[in-house]
């Protein structure tokens, strides 16, 4: 695939799928304020994915609604981290922390992309992601220093989620060209910055960051290989849209 | 969203307890209200006023949070980006209203935790319309348009009431509900003027919801003889019948205008400008509000699960030794 398309699909699909998952917290948050916060972040992520699908459309791909609502799992390029069910709040919070640290650094780097339309969009998106990271850090610090119960839960969630989070940085065949053309700094450099960034926050808690070199990343998402959770998510998302794809809803 | 449908159990005059109140303070209180002044949390108020307002605001808050559930299930299924994002924002507003209203109710002395506990234990009620199912996307649109429209009629009236914190919350809520109404109307118009599949789905949803909409404002005032004192204290600002008439006058013509029909052969406006309609099934209404509706158990079960799953987070936040985190933004 063309390196620009390859990169944009990965970015857009991540945002769409995690936005969808975050929206499932409606009515279920541990406190009302978290219902509202997860909804805000979900709305931002949906908006980010729409902007990125719009860039794809400008490059000749189908309309954003068609791309988002009619593809099946093997045609999606999101990392598997984003598609996992919301689980309990500890998992959703840790996923949000690990993912959004990577996303903020990613879009800060993309603000200097050689592909100007993407750089412009990234400058807007990174400003919003700053608040997602602020939210994640506040809660991770709070729960990661509170009760033994909370610390135990958060540590378990961290250990469960980290292998999936390493899958964020899975590369495709287009990676060398993505870097050489100045589109993006590349996943390896992003992962290095991410490790520093999450370690700094976790150091302010009672949580322990395991040695990442000893973990096996869960990969496949960038190549259309997904968990059993993605297709049911897509079927649900498209349930109404597919009733009559010609209709204006 | 809210209707007065859940606040019909007003005490009889004999049980008001007013004879135990200081007559001088009571007279001053009533004079202030008559002058159009607002009552604030630290002001003196009769026990009955405090009790009725607490119950009313609490039920309103519960209605917002329970009401977000049937609409929330359509966030993940909304067709297309535009609707998905709007549906999310709309439902988020409803949860935000709950947050505002629980805060307003707390000024009267009952904690949010106690109110939520009473909700999941069935001690306090919420608007009865949310005990009905929303089997299609069109049902969700009908709620967004017409239930929110009903809520605005009710809340615009109550925003002129006497209790300051509730009035201020309602002013903010009404401003947001006005957007929901536009969103709901836009979605209904698209369906009603769309493909045969869409038109059929919308008409069926409207037929399903009409009986519940007709009960939204509560039983006829003829059936409730105890509203006088609450009207005098500006706790209740408009009668159920007046709200229902206003709603019919504003929205029936709009429904007919877009080619939809309503499943009541007796619905018409008479020469005096009063809407006539078939009397709703109040026995069924009472049965549902008392717990035997199609979705009562499910709504409470979902809320209870959320409370139980989140309990560890609330315990962690209440730890006095937890490190203080400065609010950053």
Image (spheres, rainbow, N blue to C red):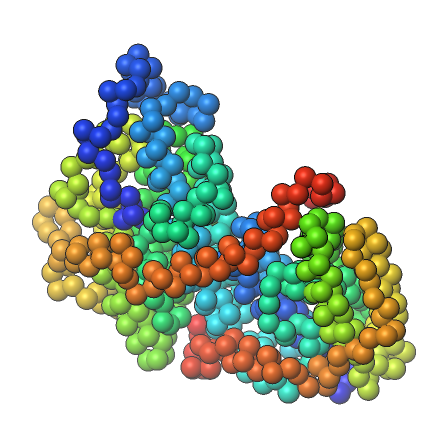
Q: Quadrant of residue B310?
A: bottom right
- Residue B101 visible in the snapshot: yes
- Residue B149 visible in the snapshot: no
Q: Quadrant of residue A162?
A: bottom right
Q: Eyeballing the image, is A181 above or below B2?
A: below
**Residue A101 in the image, given as x and y percentages of width and height:** 77, 61
Q: Residue at position x 33%, y 74% from top?
A: B201
**Residue A225 in the image, given as x and y percentages of width and height:** 68, 86
Furthest residue in direction left, as rendered: B271
Furthest residue in direction top, as rendered: B24
**Residue B236 in the image, given as x and y percentages of width and height:** 29, 36
Q: Residue at position x 48%, y 42% from top?
A: B112
A24 relative to B144 in the view: left or right: right
Residues A178 and B279: in front is B279
Furthest residue in direction front, as rendered: A148
B284 relative to A205 in the view: left or right: left
Q: Quadrant of residue B277?
A: bottom left
């Amino acid at each position: 695939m063309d390196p620009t398309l390859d990169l944009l699909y990965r970015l857009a699909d991540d945002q769409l799928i995690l936005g969808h998952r975050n929206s499932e917290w409606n009515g279920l948050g541990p406190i009302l304020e978290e219902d509202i916060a997860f909804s805000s972040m979900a709305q931002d992520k949906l908006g980010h994915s729409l902007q990125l699908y719009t860039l794809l459309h400008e490059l000749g791909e189908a309309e954003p609604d068609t791309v988002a609502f009619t593809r099946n799992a093997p045609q999606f390029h999101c990392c598997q981290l984003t598609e996992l069910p919301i689980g309990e709040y500890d998992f959703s919070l840790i996923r949000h922390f690990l993912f959004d640290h990577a996303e903020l650094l990613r879009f800060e780097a993309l603000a200097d992309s050689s592909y100007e339309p993407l750089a412009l969009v990234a400058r807007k998106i990174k400003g919003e992601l700053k608040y997602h990271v602020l939210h994640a850090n506040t809660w991770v610090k709070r729960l990661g220093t509170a009760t033994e119960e909370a610390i135990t839960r958060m540590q378990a969630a961290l250990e469960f989620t980290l292998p999936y989070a390493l899958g964020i940085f899975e590369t495709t065949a287009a990676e060398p060209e993505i870097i050489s053309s100045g589109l993006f700094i590349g996943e390896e450099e992003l992962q290095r910055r991410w490790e520093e960034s999450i370690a700094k926050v976790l150091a302010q808690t009672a949580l322990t960051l395991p040695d990442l070199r000893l973990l096996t990343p869960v990969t496949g998402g960038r190549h259309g290989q997904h968990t059993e959770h993605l297709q049911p998510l897509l079927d649900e998302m498209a349930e109404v849209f597919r009733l009559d794809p010609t209709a204006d809803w | 969203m809210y209707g007065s449908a859940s606040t019909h159990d007003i005490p009889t005059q004999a049980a008001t307890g007013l004879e135990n109140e200081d007559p001088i303070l009571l007279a001053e209180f009533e004079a202030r209200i008559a002058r159009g002044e607002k009552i604030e949390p630290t002001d003196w108020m009769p026990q009955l006023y405090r009790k009725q307002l607490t119950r009313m605001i609490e039920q309103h808050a519960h209605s917002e949070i329970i009401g977000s559930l049937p609409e929330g299930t359509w966030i993940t299924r909304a067709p297309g980006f535009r609707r998905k994002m709007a549906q999310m924002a709309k439902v988020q507003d409803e949860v935000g209203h709950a947050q505002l209203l629980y805060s307003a109710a707390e000024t009267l002395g009952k904690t949010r935790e106690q109110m939520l506990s009473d909700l999941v234990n069935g001690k306090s009620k919420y608007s009865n319309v949310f005990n009905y199912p929303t089997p299609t996307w069109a049902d969700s649109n009908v709620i967004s348009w017409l239930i929110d429209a009903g809520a605005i009629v009710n809340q615009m009236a109550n925003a002129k009431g006497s209790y300051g914190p509730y009035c201020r919350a309602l002013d903010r809520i009404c401003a947001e509900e006005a957007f929901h109404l536009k969103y709901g109307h836009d979605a209904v118009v698209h369906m009603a003027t769309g493909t045969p599949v869409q038109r059929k789905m919308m008409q069926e949803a409207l037929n399903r919801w009409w009986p519940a909409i007709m009960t939204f404002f509560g039983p006829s005032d003829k059936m409730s003889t105890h509203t006088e004192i609450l009207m005098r204290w500006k706790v209740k600002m408009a009668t159920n019948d007046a709200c229902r008439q206003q709603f019919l006058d504003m929205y029936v013509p709009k429904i007919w205008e877009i080619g939809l029909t309503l499943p009541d052969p007796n619905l018409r406006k008479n020469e005096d400008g009063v809407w006539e309609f078939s009397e709703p099934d109040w026995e069924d209404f009472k049965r549902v509000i008392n717990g035997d509706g199609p979705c009562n158990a499910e709504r409470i079960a979902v809320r209870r699960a959320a409370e139980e799953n989140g309990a560890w987070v609330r315990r962690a936040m209440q730890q006095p030794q937890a490190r203080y985190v400065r609010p950053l933004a």
